[in-house]
Image (spheres, rainbow, N blue to C red):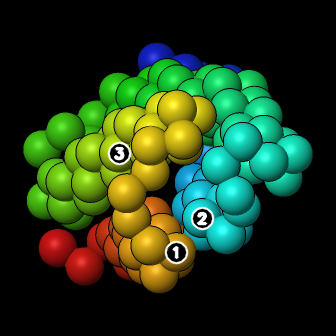
Amino acid sequence: MTGFLGAGYPWVSALHIISVMTWMTGMLYLPQLFAYHCRAEPGSVQSETFKVMERRLLGIIINPTMLLSWFFGLMLAAHLDAWSETWFHGKLALLAVMQVTHVAFARWRRHFAEDGHRRRERFYRRAHDIPGLAMIGIVLLVVVKPF
């Protein structure tokens, strides 16, 4: 490899893939928890259990792996000098969608923690589609590099 990572490139690439997979797993699961949480009576044991699950999922898994994904991803982008590539700009746009979704999920978790959610179960089930579709787009852009 000719970039600054040298022989470390495969390791950074593997760590990036692992962190992205873990981040995406959490991003796909959290809105499902929200949907189930909608069915629970506020203040019930079930509702309190969902609050703990949502807080831990976001704080222990989603947030740290999002940071690691960005860290390793930026290292790879610098190594490959992808900044001027059109496909990379598309990937960054989809990553912006992922970040906005991440922030929305964190806000919704706070609403549930305060028993203040205002949306129906179906809304959260549809929100589940956003990170999934963004992930599909990102993988296609990175692997196929259509432009």
Type of amino acid under label 3? Ala
- Give the structural element (helix, strand or loop) at label 1: helix
Quarter of the picture containing the N terminus is: top right
In this rendering, the answer to whether 54 lies above or below 70 is: below
Q: Tell me the tag on residue 38.
A: 2
Label 1 Cα crowd, 10 Å radius (few <14 / some 14-19 / many 20+): some
Q: How much space separates mark 1 and mark 2, taking CA atoms?
A: 6 Å
The label nearer to you, 1 versus 3, is: 1
In this rendering, the answer to whether 112 lies above or below 21 is: above
Q: How much space separates mark 1 and mark 3, taking CA atoms?
A: 16 Å
- Give the structural element (helix, strand or loop) at label 2: helix
Q: Position of residue 14 (x, y in %)?
A: 72, 42
* Residue depicted at x 68% and y 32%: 55
In this rendering, the answer to whether 16 lies above or below 32 is: above
Q: Tell me the tag on residue 121.
A: 1
Label 3 Cα crowd, 10 Å radius (few <14 / some 14-19 / many 20+): few
Judge whether residue 70 can be spotted in this image. yes
Number of numbered discs on residues: 3
Whether the residues at callouts 1 and 2 have beta carbons within 8 Å, the answer is: yes
Residues 49 and 104: in front is 49
Q: Which residue is mark 3?
A: 104
Q: Earlier in the sequence, mark 2 or mark 3?
A: 2
Label 2 Cα crowd, 10 Å radius (few <14 / some 14-19 / many 20+): many
